[in-house]
Image (tube, rainbow, N blue to C red):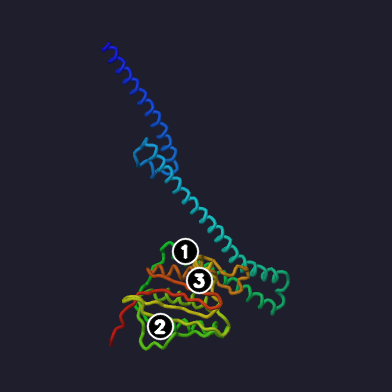
Amino acid sequence: MGFFCVFLILCFSCCFLIIQSRIERFIYRRVKKIYDDVSLLESTDFRTKSITTDMKTLTEEIEKFAEDKKVEIDTLKIREEYRKEFLGNIAHELKTPLFTVQGYILTLLDGAMSDKKVREKYLERANKGVERLIYIVKDLDLITKLEVGDLNLDKEEFDILEVIQSVFDLLEMKASKKRISLTFDMEYSEPVMVYADQEKVQQVITNLLVNSIKYGNEKGTTEVSVENLIANKVIVRVTDNGEGIPKQHIPRLFERFYRVDKSGSRKEGGSGLGLAIVKHIVEAHGERIYVESEEEVGSEFSFTLEKMENKKS
């Protein structure tokens, strides 16, 4: 009887171990197949980890993987929308001057060539269209270099006030057409020395002032100030009392070709890349740019620069 009981226990134990082994192997194969299938989508997440047959752990890992993929897909969808919008914008920006040039040339070819006054007028207008195309292409080339980090900065010490004044002089006629005054916020008795790429900083200030003039009100004011921020930083502010920017547009202001005015008329011209270039130049210096705006009140764009101590004579 005792032998029979021992035999039963041994048989039961053997059967249990065999069944357990078979079940574990079955589960392992199924789980391994899941890991292999998932690893086809993302090898770095699963192949580097040991395979577990713990259902709770496996469920958590799969759920995390699914969540990560959802975020990745959403990001790709946003990028795809941005790509479509960008291509649509650049097509619009290029086709307008192209069709203009083509129209004038075709008119000349159709017989207007014989009239000297008409010929000269149409050739001048066609030339303006070509100049606009060159302007857009140059800005595209610049922003491409900025985005890939292929633009070397030639940093030097210079007086930021002199640069601002030179931009004032350059844009004086453009501002006078809308009777907008370009001015400092105060009279500066000493130079403000900064360390940056002078040519690129001048372009930043030019782009910001041009934008301010474009969207400023008749008889308005654009004011520039240079203030100490911290020990080794200054902040340059460009403030106007223009039409202002609706809040919903502010997060996208620095995107390429993004315009607040969606009418498509492009009455103010420009390449649509000015603010995007400003942002990339400022960030290439390791600095920050800020914007504050309120409709019917005005806008303020500001950016930081590295400050140098003034040399005493």
13, above or below 83, in the image: above
The quadrant of the picture occupied by the C terminus is bottom left
| Residue 145 on image: x %, y % | 44, 64
Reading the image, the residue beneath label 1 is 144
Q: Earlier in the sequence, mark 3 or mark 1?
A: 1
Q: Earlier in the sequence, mark 1 or mark 2?
A: 1
Callout 2 crowding tier (Cα within 10 Å): few <14, some 14–19, many ≥20: many
Q: Which three-letter amino acid code belongs to the residue tagged 1? A: Thr
Who is closer to the viewer here, 82 or 3?
3
Q: Which three-letter amino acid code belongs to the residue tagged 3? A: Gly
Residue extending farthest to the right is 111
Looking at the rendered structure, the secondary structure element under dot 1 is helix
Q: Nearer the viewer, mark 1 or mark 2?
A: 2
Label 2 – label 3 distance at C-alpha:
22 Å
The quadrant in which residue 199 appears is bottom left
| Residue 29 on image: x %, y % | 40, 31
Reading the image, the residue beneath label 3 is 274
Looking at the rendered structure, the secondary structure element under dot 3 is helix
Reading the image, the residue beneath label 2 is 161
Identify which residue is drawn at 47% across, 85% down.
Answer: 183
64, above or below 135, in the image: above
Q: Is residue 3 left or right of residue 25?
A: left
Who is closer to the viewer here, 228 or 259?
228
Check contact, mark 2 vs mark 3: CB within 8 A.
no
Identify which residue is drawn at 56% across, 68% down.
Answer: 259
Q: Which three-letter amino acid code belongs to the residue tagged 2? A: Leu
Who is closer to the viewer here, 168 or 246?
246
279, above or below 237, in the image: above
Callout 3 crowding tier (Cα within 10 Å): few <14, some 14–19, many ≥20: many
Question: Looking at the rendered structure, which numbered label has been put on residue 23?
Answer: none
Q: Is residue 49 left or right of residue 87?
A: left
Q: Earlier in the sequence, mark 2 or mark 3?
A: 2
